[in-house]
Image (cartoon, helix red, strand yellow):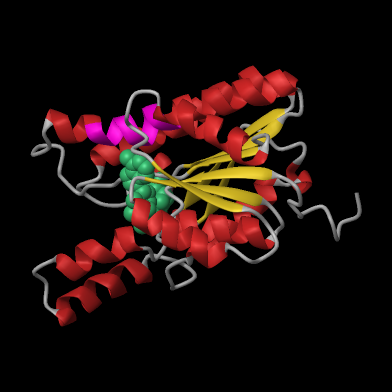
Amino acid sequence: MPASMIFRLDEKNAVVTGGAMGIGLGIATSFVEAGANVLIVDIDGDAARTAAAELEGRGTKVAWMQTDLTDEGSPEEVVGRCVEEFGSIDILVNNAGIYPQVPMLEITPETFDRVYQLNVKALAFASRAAAARMIEVGTGGSIINIGSIDSYHPSMVGLTAYDTSKGGVLMFTKGLALEVAPHGVRVNIIAPGGITTPGTSKPLAESKMSPEETEAMMAKFTEMVPMKRFGRPEEIGSAAVFLASEAASYVTGTTLIVDGGRLLG
Ligand SMILES: NC(=O)c1ccc[n+]([C@@H]2O[C@H](COP(=O)([O-])OP(=O)(O)OC[C@H]3O[C@@H](n4cnc5c(N)ncnc54)[C@H](O)[C@@H]3O)[C@@H](O)[C@H]2O)c1
């Protein structure tokens, strides 16, 4: 395949979990631009419907589905829905994740479980359902799990449950990649650094900090990034297009860190 075509996703059918906003919407948008049909899956049905409407009319099929991925059976239903809508599943992006900021000395078992249930267990079972289908059909496929720079290194106090879950994503991905590689199913991770999304902006907007304090805190975080800025959702989208495409046909079990150099410091 010529290099001009190798990054295209024409006729590929993709699921993006947590695709209604933030990084997930960035990935869904990049996939549509690269030619893929996309099923946006989100707990927020209204936001998913709005996101799908925005992406319609760009030459590919876009569908949406409201579900809480932590519900029993939800990950498998998502894969079934993609097959129902588009005929197959070629790409799964496990992006939905939560990152409540609570120090370990204060966290409740319920909050710890909530993080684990979505960030690890739902991701694992959606991956399993997608891989099983890809193997059954015999076409192979690409599974992309959204980890974090926190898969490698805690970025701040208050994210220990999250860091534990994202460390789990790292090892789960390697284990599954090893298991399904003979079937042509590739499983990789994108590890974003700080990306401006509703999930990162909302707590700041709702905090009791003054605008000056918020600005000072943001400046402190930005200072720690060698590229001196936060990332944008579409910059994770580009990385996902690469990993989903033929350009990454021999890439599995690895992590693409997209962090403006943050882990260098
Ligand atoms: N933003 C960052 O700086 C950053 C950095 C590293 C990793 N990440 C990871 O990227 C992913 C997306 O982060 P974001 O900042 O875009 O988050 P966000 O909060 O802006 O968006 C997350 C989306 O997931 C959906 N969602 C939440 N719980 C769900 C559930 N139970 N079932 C289905 N959908 C659910 C939300 O409704 C939302 O649309 C997460 O896995 C996060 O850990 C983010």
Q: Residue furthest bottom?
A: 212
Q: Is residue 92 above or below residue 4?
A: above
Q: Is residue 8 above or below residue 138?
A: below
Viewer-proximal residue among 153 and 88: 88
Q: Position of residue 131 (x, y in %)?
A: 61, 25
Give me the residue at 33% from left, 63% from top. 198
Q: Position of residue 261 (x, y in %)?
A: 50, 60
Q: Main secondary structure of the magenta part?
A: helix
Determine the image quadrant of residue 104.
Answer: top left
Magenta residue check for 120: yes
Labels in figure, total: 0
From the viewer's perspective, is 60 left or right of 260?
Answer: right
From the viewer's perspective, is 225 left or right of 81?
Answer: left
Give me the residue at 39% from left, 37% from top. 166
Viewer-proximal residue among 21 and 6: 21
Q: Residue furthest right?
A: 2
Q: Residue furthest front?
A: 84
Residue 238 visible in rendering: no
Q: Position of residue 175 (x, y in %)?
A: 55, 22
Q: Position of residue 144 (x, y in %)?
A: 57, 40
From the viewer's perspective, is 83 left or right of 106?
Answer: right
Please report the bounds of the magenta region as a residue range.
Answer: 114-123
Magenta residue check for 130: no
From the viewer's perspective, is 39 left or right of 49?
Answer: right
Q: Please state, as top left, top right, bottom left or bottom right, where the C terminus lies in the image.
A: bottom left
Determine the image quadrant of residue 32.
Answer: bottom right
Determine the image quadrant of residue 133.
Answer: top right
Viewer-proximal residue among 201 and 225: 201
Give me the residue at 24% from left, 78% from top. 215
Residue 250 visible in rendering: yes
Q: Is residue 45 above or below residue 168?
A: below
